[in-house]
Amino acid sequence: MALWQKIYYKLLNLPLSAWVNTQCIPSEPVEQLNLSLARPIVYVLPFQSHTDLLTLRRTCLRQGLPDPLTPLTIGDVTLPRYVFISHGRKVFSGDDDLPARSLAHFKDLLHLHRQDSELDIQLVPASVLWQRDPGNETQRHQAILRAMNGPEKLWTILTRGRDGMVRLSQAVSLRYMADKHGTDQAIAHKLARVAMIHFSRQKLAASGPRLPNRGLLFKRLLASKAIDKVVHDEAQTRDVSVDKVRKEAIDMMEEIAANFSYRLIRYSDRILTWLWNKLYQGIHVNNAERVRQLAQDGHEIVYVPCHRSHMDYLLLSYVLYKEGLVPPHIAAGVNLNFFPAGPLFRRGGAFFIRRSFKGNRLYSTVFREYLAELFARGYSVEYFAEGGRSRTGRLLPAKTGMLAMTLQAMLRGLQRPITLVPVYIGYEHVMEVNTYAKELQGQRKEKESVGQVLGIVRKLRNYGLGYVNFGEPIALNQHLNEQVPDWHDYINPMEPQKPAWMNPVVSDLATKVMTHINDAAATNALNLCATALLASRQRALSREALEAQLGVYQALLTQAPYSASSSVPQDSPADLVDHALSLNKLVVEKDTMGEVISLDRQQAILMTYYRNNVIHLVALPSLIAQILVTHKSISRSGLRACVQQLYPLLKAELFM
């Protein structure tokens, strides 16, 4: 690097280091992207930008990755460790062609692979996203991936410099490219084209499609054949004017539709970061990369989380935003549409749904058409299949209405594949757990209100750890192909279809979703301690016995994992017990034998909630152990026969 370039970078880095604060996606790129630090790495950036390069450099050094400004030396050849795909934009020029220097760089790298059969350079796509606002559908159309000129970049850094994101992607093996496709100039061009498509999809996955204008959205919905037909049918049946029924339909749209605001999302990010730091000691996220890949591949993503707490709405949207994905449009109960929470939720992406559609054909049609519009426009959606929050900690049987409407949207002939992403959300403390216990004892459910929200705010304290685990996705096209091979014959863009096979297919899908949620369960210090203590006599164990039991659980769940999506804490049993004690839910007494850890009567009732979150993980080992204890001695075939007889009951009850 020339001396003038070093001086320039040092001067430019001074304001950037003071003002810019970017987040790396994924948070641990070496581990999560399976990068090998023993093999050479070259970074590929979409646009020529010294600001982006220095921002990437800071992130790489923080993550233990090679410095992009350090040249790559292979044998007697020295090359830059980065390459730009496009010139970018100048103030008075729109030139963004592939620079000749970049093309030459690709050719040189491929040439090295032709000379050395053992060489395998990793090309790591790296982009810096300074803003993620997709804009409104009424604004002038711009390309998804667009470089900024100097003044635009300066203004963006000044206003959004602390909200930037450095996105690293799966490495491309140049050895594979050379062996599979060759090393000529055409391959160099192909690499550049594929990289630019990759960056465009990445930007769309991070910002999403343009946001709808509510007025235009309502006009489109009213013009749909399904709503137009039901409006005229209702007017004729009730002997009222068409305009009156149309006005009712518009009122329903106003009640239902979200009013998504990216500005609110951006401000909420700071508020929620403070809130989670106030409430929890950390949020553990697992398997987010599989969701990023779905978004980048152009899937219509429907998140289907379990429902533990009102915090679920905020937590999942926050996690997705932090993971470089678009916060979804969320189906929320109309009971949450109270002032001031309702308008805020609506601008955060919530659309409201009544508890029952029964007997209201107009409402059901309007809602179904609104949901189909979200899918058709490419907005990710979130709904809770259980319908309401679990009061026991176990998964509730899924309510199938939203799943059925999702399949009906497919039967309208959607072009993009729809994929359900089951999500396990777990907490070491659920805010409403005391309320759940009272409701199970017969107390009426308290109606959501401003007072209830203020009551929660007054109780803000440290609630331990939170967990968001993304389960194995369910591709609806594939599911239908397996269940109903001729489902394409039922596609009708005009009328919603409900063929005879719909109910059994939806029922099977609902069970599959809930099973995949449980597959992604997260064990933690509290639910493991709850499981051990509630299974012991008098709900008490010595500290040594409790630690030994936690060690057994950890070994069992690690060496014979329940599923590839579940997670097990890696801390030592002693640390897990210390952490559980810090949450002030366990009673500790000391005697001559040492510490005895127990649960009092009230906490024992509440701790069943946390045990029930993960009881399915140990149900089968527990069944086998109980059979062995009961029979004293039994053959392998006899044990298998006993398990086969009883397991279907557990499977149906616990979504195993």
Image (tube, helix red, strand yellow):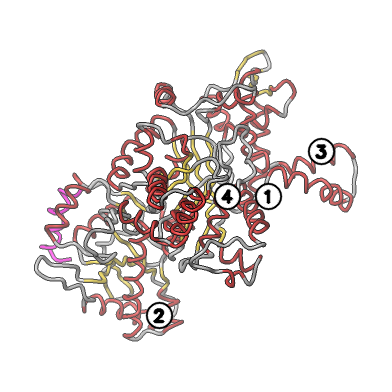
Residue 507 visible: yes
Res 460 → quadrant = top left
Query: In the rendered structure, which segment of residues is drawn in magenta?
Result: 1-18
**Looking at numbered disc 1 in the image, what kind of residue is underneath it?**
Ala
Give whichever of discs 2 and 1 has the lower sequence position: 2
For marks 2 and 3, give the one nearer the viewer.
3
Q: Earlier in the sequence, mark 4 or mark 1?
A: 4
The amino acid pointed to by label 4 is: Gly
- Locate residue 304, reporting x and y percent: 53, 49
- Of helix, strand and loop, which one carries label 4? helix
* Residue on which the image places disc 3: 626
> Looking at the image, which residue sits at the far top?
591
Q: Nearer the viewer, residue 378 or 555?
A: 378
Q: What amino acid is found at the position of numbered circle 2 in the picture?
A: Asp
Q: Are marks 3 and 4 in contact (CB under 8 Å)?
A: no
Say if the magenta span includes residue 5.
yes
- Spatial CA distance of label 1 from label 3 is 18 Å
Q: Distance between the residues labelled 4 and 1?
A: 36 Å
Residue marked by disc 2 = 116
| Neighbour tally class for label 2: few under 14, some 14-19, many 20 plus, Cα within 10 Å | few
User: Would you identify the image quadrant in which residue 231 lies?
Assistant: bottom left
Q: Distance between the residues labelled 2 and 1?
A: 42 Å
The main secondary structure of the magenta stretch is helix
Please say if 285 is above or below 390: below
Q: Distance between the residues labelled 3 and 4?
A: 39 Å
Q: Residue at x 39, y 51 (%)?
A: 246
Residue pointed to by mark 1? 560
Mark 3, other Cα within 10 Å: few <14 / some 14–19 / many ≥20: few
| Residue identified by numbered label 4 | 401
